[in-house]
Image (cartoon, grey):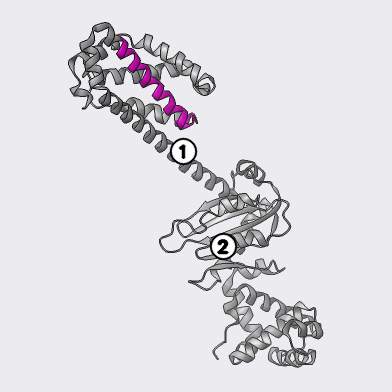
Amino acid sequence: MPPSSLAPPVAKLAADLLGQTDQLADQLLARISEQIEIYRMESIVGRGELRTSLIANTNQILARLSGELGPDLSAPRHIGRTRAVQDMPLPEVLRAYRLGFAFLWERLLAAARDSGQKSVDALLDTATAIWELADDFSLALTESYREAMSERMIAADRRRSGIISAILDGPATGSLSAWEVAKLLDLPYDGTFLVVVAEVTGSHSSALPRLEDRLRQLDVGSAWRSQPQHEIGVLSLGQRRDQAEVLASVAQVALGRVGVSPLFHRLDGAARALRLAQVALETSAPGTKGIRRLDDDPHIDLLVRDRDTTRRFVVRVLHGVLAMPDHERTTLLATATAWIDSRGSAAEAGRLLYCHENTVRHRIRRVEERLGGSLDDPRVLSDLTIALQAIRAFPELGNRLDT
């Protein structure tokens, strides 16, 4: 039965108690403070503020029971939002509410006994409706509390995203310094870092679900910025020397392409690392899943800065090789790469390629023919080295060139 239809004796009991709200609030305040420790901490909830809220809630409950007030849950909603802002634990707030309703029930029962058996019987007959009202108040409080906490979390995420932008987007006038950002994000300024850019795919809301939990288990700190198409994270590896376990965790949860930067060692290197991680993602094959990472080659910044210029450079240097049929082209490019990685050692390159060193020498001569110059010439060697680094960064530059 709704409170508005409670028996007249019950409505009269509630109306009589309405005139004692101040005294009731004082008694209830003493009980709550005695039984719930956190309410004794005035740094969280001052006694004056607590008393005011008890008066408001008591008035609203008794006014509902007396029939003087229709359905109104503004008091529990207000207290739910207030306690969320104060970081009060929800279970303790609900416990205080239960104490409050139990206290009012005691006072109603005592008043009914003083009034006579008819009032006691009427109160007992409507006990279910009174406790349904208690449920309504508790539910309104809980919903308001959770709404406020959700708003706070969203605001905190936006603030954190704005803070991390100060290092990911590079220095700007009036922006936070990397030192300040490190402190606000609870990350070290010096250390071992990676930037991860993950593609959000399909209808998924997260590109790397549950990754933060995995990282915490590995004692890896992280800070994230979410965008409609990507999630960007700065990972602090701490003293960890082996990054393989961290990258394996990223790969296990990835739902799409992920670009990973080379390691860097100061937080103010995050902007450069982000550019490299973005390039790594963008140069992965669309529709695939997994990690791609660029090597931190000496010329990498120049190569990724202007792709059109890089493409023209690769074509100018490797035109003769890129115009060859697929098998020959890929064989010569792989041989040249292994030979340069081996610092010009045909024997070491042969071990990398699983072929005889004389085969390597023969292929290198064919590369020189296609380049139109000897690799003994430092300029030719330098051009070839940079062109091969460009192909590593942008694999599509090694595709066959139509002539």
The quadrant of the rendering that contains the C terminus is bottom right
Q: Quick check: can you spot residue 308?
A: yes
Number of marks drawn: 2
Percent position (x, y) of residue 181? 62, 44
The tag on residue 252 is: 2
Q: Is residue 389 left or right of residue 33?
A: right
Q: Nearer the viewer, mark 2 or mark 1?
A: 2
Whether the magenta-drawn stretch holds residue 86 is answered as yes
The tag on residue 315 is: none
Q: How many residues crowd mark 1 within 10 Å: few (<14), some (14–19), many (20+)? A: some
The quadrant of the rendering that contains the N terminus is top left
Percent position (x, y) of residue 273? 63, 59
* Residue 387 to residue 210: above or below: below
Q: In whole angstroms, how far apart are the C-alphas of marks 2 and 1?
A: 31 Å
Whether the magenta-drawn stretch holds residue 342 is answered as no
Secondary structure at numbered mark 2: helix
Q: Is residue 324 left or right of residue 4?
A: right
* Residue 355 to residue 52: above or below: below
From which residue to which does the magenta span run? 84-110
Q: Quick check: can you spot residue 376?
A: no
Main secondary structure along the magenta-highlighted residues: helix
Q: Are marks 2 and 1 in contact (CB under 8 Å)?
A: no
